[in-house]
Amino acid sequence: MSEYLSISTPAGSFDALAAGPEDGRPVLLLHGFPEAAMEWEYQVGVLGREGYRAVAPDQRGYSPGVRPENVADYAIEHLVDDVVAMADALGWARFDLVGHDWGGAVAWWTADAHPERLRSVTSVSTPHPGALAEALRSDEEQAMRSQYMRDWRGRDTEKRMLANNAEALRRMYEWKVPRSRVEDYVRRLSEPGALTAALNWYRAGKPAARIGKVSVPALYVWSTEDVAFGSTAALSTENWVTGPYEFQMLEDVTHWVPEEVPEAFTALLLEFLHGR
């Protein structure tokens, strides 16, 4: 059975979904846009039953208790600091970190900045940011795929996404996320200030420093029908990992891996974690 937590940090209190014994091996799971901790409901439950202590927080801007108004407060360094602060609050000296979409980007940056804190890192969909940056320069297709990141920085983005009963927002899930889950996401993001906070992740601008190669054991799961990330960045991610690395490709699966194929993905994750 999953439980709900409030994780108190200097930045504020994060809402979280959790399962598993308190003394179980700790795993932190970071959601993407436009989702919430609930995207990991299946994985948290399975990990908990397997004896892990799995915690999936609503991240900065998604948790009402951590929703600053300034765009600069959503810079990647603050998102990484949140991960460390939550782990500290949970009493975790070392932990496994899993992320999807934006959560995957935060996971990569955390692995670069705090390798001593991580037992392993898993990114779903999102390639290593260094590999993505290279692809954006060299691959016209990836540049086209990533155009949305610039488009969503516009001031009228919230209005467009929420118009006509959030039609544009609903389309993003490509009918691959359970309808009840989509309704929950739309309801959450329709709350005053919530969608602006989520979009501020895109508006915060480039990181202050460059990311390096990751030394902790890494699993990268990429799906062939992902509209956001193409094969160029996916296949070159291995060049940005110096530690043990596993790459898993899911055929005929879209961007929404954890919710579209929860059993298949969770099996890959468990196999990876069991080997560490």
Image: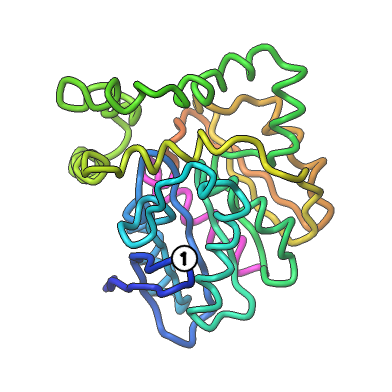
Q: Is residue 50 left or right of residue 93?
A: left
The magenta stretch is 258-276
**As displayed, is residue 57 above or below residue 132?**
below
Label 1: which secondary element? loop
**As displayed, is residue 21 above or below residue 47?**
below
* The residue positioned farthest toward the front in the image shown: 70
Crowd around label 1: few <14 · some 14–19 · many ≥20 (10 Å): some
Residue 147: % across, % down: 54, 18
Residue 50: % across, % down: 44, 74
Classify residue 85 by image quadrant.
bottom right
**As displayed, is residue 58 above or below residue 161?**
below
Q: Nearer the viewer, residue 273 or 60?
A: 60
Q: Tell me the residue at 23%/43% (across/down).
A: 192
Q: Which residue is mark 1?
A: 11
* The residue positioned farthest toward the left in the image shown: 165
Residue 268: % across, % down: 54, 54
Q: Tell me the residue at 30%/44% (across/down).
A: 194
Which quarter of the rendered picture does the N terminus lie within? Answer: bottom left
**As displayed, is residue 150 above or below residue 84?**
above
Amino acid type, callout 1 = Ala
Q: Is residue 68 left or right of residue 201?
A: left
Asked if residue 98 lies in the magenta stretch, the reply is no
Main secondary structure of the magenta stretch: helix
Q: Nearer the viewer, residue 263 or 195?
A: 195
Which quarter of the rendered picture does the C terminus lie within? Answer: bottom right
Q: Is residue 169 left or right of residue 264?
A: left
Q: Tell me the residue at 60%/48% (across/down).
A: 76
Classify residue 166 by image quadrant.
top left
Q: Nearer the viewer, residue 205 or 236?
A: 205
Q: Tell me the residue at 32%/33% (across/down).
A: 176
Residue 252: % across, % down: 47, 28
